[in-house]
């Protein structure tokens, strides 16, 4: 296992189209997180899963955003009816739950450009 | 006031210099992370600290829980160290609160 994998690396889409990103975490990690990062800003938390359960969603995640982790392994993040403001880097991270002593492994991100 | 503040925002130094990046936070935390982000966007986790000091190669990270302060040091800096360094604190069970990052440029 070489780390957290995200696909695609880059996505350019027209406004109004739907896009879907995929994240493959480290196989033994039971937690998976999605973050969004816009230019010049730190990443913003979007949502996280523990196994297949989506335990928390940020208020940043509008109704156009949906995330799934159907078998507790890979996750998808879908954005419907994309808007130019959705242009950002979408980062996925995974971790183990071992009390408070766990670290995060990040993917390389998917850069979305909405034109 | 941001809950996590980093300084400096930008730092340019010559190769070989000793680098210090500071992070102060105002919330109670369970751990603090130092991360490195390269221009392509990928983020690498450097350290996770809940107390004391950690060292990995030329990188050293310290944390003072009482003072709510952490520092990241780079010894014998090299141009390949050029990146954005981000301090993030873990608040609660999963939330990371991120600093704005420090853009480091090491000139040969």
Image (cartoon, rainbow, N blue to C red):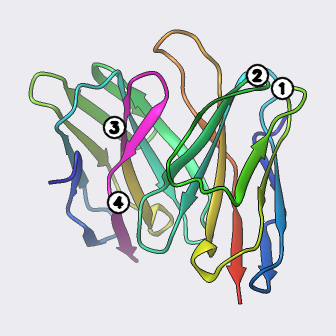
List x then y, in percent, for residue A102: 54, 20
State the SS at label 4: loop
Q: CA distance from mark 1 to mark 2?
A: 4 Å
> Could you tell me which chain the residue with mark 3 belongs to?
B
User: Considering only vertical position in the picture, is B96 above or below A59?
Assistant: above
State the SS at label 1: loop
Q: Nearer the viewer, mark 4 or mark 2?
A: 2
List x then y, in percent, for residue A87: 62, 76
Main secondary structure of the magenta stretch: strand
Q: Which residues are magenta?
A: B88-108
What residue would you read off at disc 2? A51
Q: Nearer the viewer, mark 4 or mark 1?
A: 1
The residue furthest bottom is: A115
Q: CA distance from mark 2 to mark 3?
A: 33 Å
List x then y, in percent, for residue B92: 39, 23
Q: Nearer the viewer, mark 1 or mark 3?
A: 1
Quadrant of the image for the N terminus of chain B?
bottom left
Residue found at x 90% / y 27%: A71
The residue furthest top is: A99
State the SS at label 3: strand
Q: Which mark is residue A81?
A: none
Whether pointer 2 and pointer 3 mark residues with C-beta atoms closer than 8 Å, the reply is: no
Q: In the rendered view, does A20 fall on the left or right side of B80?
A: right
What residue would you read off at disc 4? B101
What residue would you read off at disc 3? B60
Residue A108 placement: quadrant: bottom right
Crowdedness of circle 4 by 10 Å Cα count: few (<14), some, many (20+)? Answer: many
What residue would you read off at disc 1? A72
Tell me which label, 3 or 4, sits earlier in the chain.
3
């Amino acid at each position: 296992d070489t780390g957290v994998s995200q696909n695609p690396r880059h996505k350019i889409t027209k406004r109004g189209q739907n896009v879907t990103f995929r994240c493959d975490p480290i196989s033994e990690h039971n937690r998976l997180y999605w973050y969004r990062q816009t230019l010049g800003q730190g990443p913003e938390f979007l949502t996280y899963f523990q196994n297949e359960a989506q335990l928390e969603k940020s208020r940043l995640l509008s109704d156009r955003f949906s995330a799934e982790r159907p078998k507790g392994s890979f996750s998808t993040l879908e954005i419907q009816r994309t808007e130019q403001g959705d242009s950002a880097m979408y980062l996925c991270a995974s971790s183990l739950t071992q009390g408070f002593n766990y670290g995060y492994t990040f993917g390389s991100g998917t850069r979305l450009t909405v034109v | 006031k941001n809950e996590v503040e980093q300084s400096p925002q930008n730092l340019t130094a010559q190769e070989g210099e000793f680098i210090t990046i500071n992070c102060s936070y105002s919330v109670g935390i369970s751990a603090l992370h130092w991360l490195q982000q390269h221009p392509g966007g990928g983020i690498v986790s450097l350290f996770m600290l809940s107390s004391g000091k950690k060292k990995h190669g030329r990188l050293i990270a310290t944390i003072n829980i009482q003072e709510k302060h952490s520092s990241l040091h780079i010894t014998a800096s090299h141009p390949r160290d050029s990146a954005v360094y981000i301090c993030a604190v873990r608040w609660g069970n999963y939330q990371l609160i991120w600093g704005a990052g420090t853009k480091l440029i090491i000139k040969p």
